[in-house]
Image: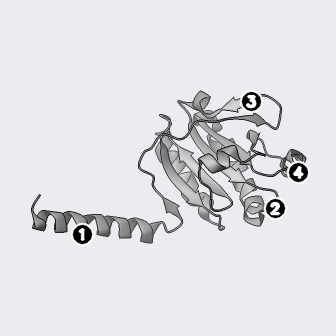
Amino acid sequence: MTSLSKNLLSAAMSIGFAALVLSNAHATIAELANAPDFTLRSMDGPNLRLQEQRGQVVMINFWATWCGPCRQEMPHLTRLYDKYRSAGFVILGVNVDDDARRATDLATKLGLKFPILLDTDKTVSRLYDLGTMPTSVLVDRNGRVRYVHNGYVAGYEELYERQIRVLLK
């Protein structure tokens, strides 16, 4: 590749990346890597494995009871789950509290309908290299990570919905 070609490619990539950052500052698009598989005990008792969700669009939402933005986001996630569940969308709420009872109590209080998985030893949280609460990972029907959202601010749910609709097509 010539020097000019390298410079043009670099400029195009920079412009594309800048456009992505400016249009969507809080989300990143992963490189279509396979979502790391895991198995966790659900709040209702049985284990649930991510790999078993192939064919569905999956949002893995990492949350904690002590996280204010997590609590704020939950009603919006419930609405999205109710709206798109029949189209092949599932949310796996991965709670990272040390005490599973706190997660169970809050999930019950909030009326969460999607599966709540318990990561009390933080194995899956480390696997996904979390740095922010909440973190939501959108996985396509083939098991590839498509979007990662770090944190939550009111209005993000509109972006989630647009991305979910694209992945469901």
Q: Earlier in the sequence, mark 4 or mark 2?
A: 2
Q: CA distance from mark 4 to mark 2?
A: 9 Å
- On the image, the x and y values in percent for residue 146 come to 47, 48
- On the image, the x and y values in percent for residue 47 come to 74, 29
In the picture of the structure, the residue carrying the numbered disc 3 is: 47
In the picture of the structure, the residue carrying the numbered disc 2 is: 66
In the picture of the structure, the residue carrying the numbered disc 4 is: 102
Q: Residue at x 50, y 52 (%)?
A: 147
Q: CA distance from mark 3 to mark 4?
A: 19 Å
Q: Which amino acid type is marked by label 2?
A: Trp
Q: Which amino acid type is marked by label 1?
A: Ala
Crowd rating for badge 3 (residues with CA inside 10 Å; few <14, some 14–19, many 20+): few
Label 4 sits on a secondary structure element that is helix
Q: Quadrant of residue 56?
A: top right
Label 1 sits on a secondary structure element that is helix
Image disc number at residue 11: 1
Q: Earlier in the sequence, mark 2 or mark 1?
A: 1
Is residue 80 visible from the viewing direction of this image? no
Q: Residue at x 86, y 52 (%)?
A: 106
Q: Residue at x 55, y 59 (%)?
A: 159
Q: Which amino acid type is marked by label 4?
A: Arg
Q: Residue at x 54, y 66 (%)?
A: 26
Label 3 sits on a secondary structure element that is strand
Q: CA distance from mark 3 to mark 2?
A: 24 Å
